[in-house]
Image (cartoon, helix red, strand yellow):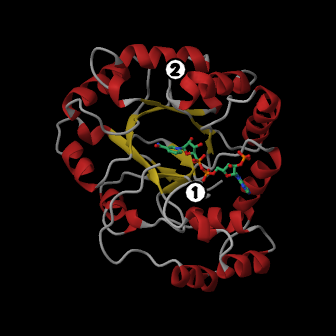
Amino acid sequence: MQTINLKNGDKLAVLGMGTWFMGERPAQRKEEIATLRYAIEQGVNLIDSAEMYGNGRSERLVGEAIAPYARESLYLISKVLPENANLRRMEQSCDASLRALNTDYLDMYLYHWRGATALEETVQGLEALKAKGKIRAWGVSNFDLEDMQELLALPQGKHCQLNQVLFHLGSRGIEYALKPYQDQQHIPTLAYCPLAQAGRLQRNLINHPVLTEVAQEIGCTPYQVLLLFVLAQPNTVAIPKAAQLQHCKDNIACLQLSLSPQQLMRLNRAFPAPTRRQALDIV
Ligand SMILES: NC(=O)c1ccc[n+]([C@@H]2O[C@H](COP(=O)([O-])OP(=O)(O)OC[C@H]3O[C@@H](n4cnc5c(N)ncnc54)[C@H](OP(=O)(O)O)[C@@H]3O)[C@@H](O)[C@H]2O)c1
């Protein structure tokens, strides 16, 4: 599988799995676990969760799904809520995530979105968890350009490994300033909502004639075209969430497909990259 490089030397597969809303419905639990296991067995080892998701229910579901696999074969990401991203509460949050995931370390811990705590204190807390071996690395989420610039100006801010933000064909605001800045700083983008569960143009996207046409040409679904578009971006990892096994299979099948330069051009024409700065899209 194609990979991208982090500054700390980690290599991340370009396709991972989101888990928001997983573990919420008992009737779906069996399929959700089977789906996560199917993906892991196909080599998709990056799983994104958060303490916020179902108040730990997503992390607990992931913990159950990963139980049969060697820990070092997985790349586990969780996130700390802004109200816990301080020296008083962060370790407690991290410990709860570790317990829920039934593991003793996270590969990546993300600051979910920026809150009232001074960035310096949050960074200090993240570095302390790293020193204790509870997390291997840390990053941020929903940080816009100025947030990233402020972060990277801090003495230990440069240890930030990635920024997880909303990005899909119909929501391309990051391409104007944030993404170029991150690329320059060697900070990859973890694209959430790659299938447009939220963001600009969500409703008019999936039935758009160009998307339908390209899907027909490739012999795939319009959702797969959305994923192929994200997978075509440099320094980017897509983390679609699929609770249904068939959806997961379709997403993994995208690793064997690609958009031709001509198809990419038509998609770019129908859904142009921004020509001016836009506020960061957030769910
Ligand atoms: N950092 C943040 O603030 C933030 C915010 C939002 C999301 N995230 C992360 O990013 C992940 C992905 O984002 P998301 O879950 O919001 O949205 P998404 O991945 O864009 O969309 C998920 C939806 O698409 C469906 N789906 C998946 N594969 C499909 C396919 N091949 N064909 C048709 N439908 C398909 C899923 O259905 P089924 O589930 O029924 O299969 C689900 O309804 C989250 O799960 C979470 O881990 C992070």
Return the residue at label 1.
Answer: 194
Dot 2 falls on a residue whose secondary structure is: helix
- The answer to whether any part of residue 166 appears in the image is yes
The answer to whether residue 104 of the structure is visible from this angle is no
Q: Residue 262 at what x, y percent from top left?
A: 61, 86
Percent of width and height locating residue 127: 30, 25
- Residue shown at 57%/63% (left/top)? 202
Dot 1, crowdedness within 10 Å: few (<14), some or many (≥20)?
many
Left or right position of 254 against 139? right
Q: Secondary structure at mark 1?
A: loop
Q: How many marks?
A: 2
- How far apart marks 2 and 1 lie (CA) works out to 25 Å
**Residue pointed to by mark 2:** 97
In this view, 44 is above or below 200: above
Please tell me which residue is depicted at 68% across the width and 81% down the height of the picture: 209
Disc 1: residue Cβ within 8 A of ligand 1's nearest atom: yes
Image coords of residue 49 (percent x, y): 56, 33
Residue 22: quadrant of the picture? top right
Decide: is 241 above or below 82. below
Q: Residues within 10 Å of mark 2 (few under 14, many from 20)?
A: many
Q: Amino acid at mark 1?
A: Pro
